[in-house]
Amino acid sequence: MSETPRDPRDGDGTGAPPAAGADRPADDRPVRASVVREAPPAGADADEYQWHTGLNRPTGVPDAVEFVDVHKAFGRNKILRGLNMGLPEGKISMILGPSGTGKSVCIKHMVGLLYPDEGDVLVHGASVPNMTDDELFEMRKKFGVLFQDGALFGSMNLIDNVAFPLRQHTDKSEEEILDIVRRRLGEVGLGHSEDKMPNELSGGMRKRAGFARALVLDPDIVLFDEPDSGLDPVRTALLCELIQEIHEENGGCYTVITHDIMSARRVAEYISVLWKGRIVESGPAEELFNSENAFVRQFLSGESQGPLGME
Ligand SMILES: Nc1ncnc2c1ncn2[C@@H]1O[C@H](COP(=O)(O)OP(=O)(O)OP(=O)(O)O)[C@@H](O)[C@H]1O
Ligand SMILES: [Mg+2]
């Protein structure tokens, strides 16, 4: 794949993409195949990306979501810098990586809340940046998303919060909706709090309510952005169990972003380690936990010694 576009920063001090970059979508690549990782380009970036082998150990299943050479900057702040990442169908994947490296930005690209400056994001093979508003609306029904802060509507009680996607996206009767909502709230241990407002709940309860809301549409793809942050260790363990149970029941592509290595050990079937806007290494969890890569080893064992510093 030597024809893959080079990093556009080469010779570009302005942050503006080169003229040819605007029409550089992924159509010269076999996009439905599992994304191919490759070594970073030689040159100025080689050092910065010396740990990025881009190695992707095969999972044997197709990807539900693919990032193909995605670049995204906010002003001069380049966040995604040639990201190639696949999230396999039917598995619980985890995206791990240092704070501020672009994990939440990735989630927003998957549901079309952010668009890449270059490259493509595919959901079940369809290009998200090229969707019409109607197509986006339909595509979003496939997703359940637990945003990092829970993102509950402050003026609605728990029932109305969790019922919101059902009222928005389905023609179900109010009776059916309340049935589903009460079942989901029960599953996350909030059966007795259904009339509470978000500001009456603890952080952990808000997370669990967000979790219930993410699952009401029985989504094919579920994205959890740090479901375990701010939870005590026991609740974290219970939440991990809940994610596994619900995944076992419903299947689909579950993607969890976390900083908690214990959570990753417990539930991850597939892991992508993200750093400096690209994948360092990805593959089945047990293989990543046995990786020879010094960065991956350091990150997955949480040690202070290694290539990753405070910066
Ligand atoms: N809408 C935005 N406008 C400008 N900058 C943004 C925006 N969203 C994210 N960023 C910047 O992109 C970078 C990556 O943010 P992101 O939230 O994806 O990090 P993260 O990997 O999720 O970190 P954490 O683990 O702390 O949640 C940060 O520097 C952030 O300031
Ligand atoms: Mg984040």
Image (cartoon, rainbow, N blue to C red):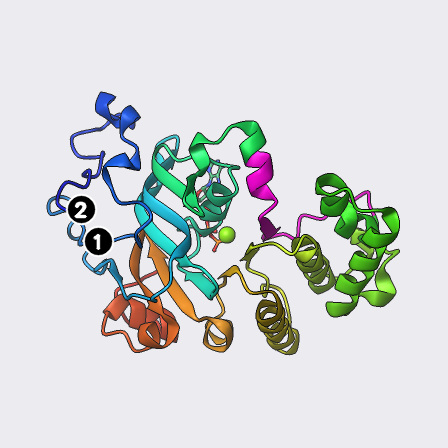
Q: State which quadrant residue 243 falls in.
A: bottom right
Q: Is mark 2 within 8 Å of ligand 1?
A: no
Q: Which residues are magenta?
A: 136-156
Q: Nearer the viewer, residue 289 or 201?
A: 289
Regarding residue 91, the answer to whether it shows in the image is yes
Check the picture and name the quadrant holding the C terminus: bottom left
Q: Residue 21 location in percent, x, y?
A: 26, 27
- Position of 244 compared to 204: left or right? left
Q: Quadrant of residue 25?
A: top left
Q: Nearer the viewer, residue 277 or 24?
A: 24
Left or right position of 239 against 69: right
Q: State the image coordinates of residue 224 (x, y, percent, origin top left).
A: 56, 57
Q: Residue at x 36, y 77 (%)?
A: 286
Q: Residue at x 30, y 63 (%)?
A: 308
Relative image position of residue 117 (x, y in whole percent): 36, 32
Q: What amino acid type is highlighted by mark number 1?
A: Tyr
Q: Which mark is residue 45?
A: 2
Q: Residue 95, relative to residue 114: is it above or below?
A: below
Residue drawn at (18%, 57%), measured in percent from left and top?
50
The reply to whether residue 311 is visible in this rendering is no
- Give yes or no for residue 151 being in the magenta stretch: yes
Q: Considering only vertical position in the picture, is 241 above or below 51? A: below
Q: Secondary structure at mark 2?
A: loop
Which residue is at the far top? 19
- Asked whether the residues under the numbered discs 2 and 1 touch, taking CB atoms below 8 Å apart as contact, a structural biologist would say yes
Q: CA distance from mark 2 to mark 1?
A: 6 Å
Q: Which residue is mark 1?
A: 49
Element type where label 1 sits in the image: loop
Q: Amino acid at mark 2?
A: Asp
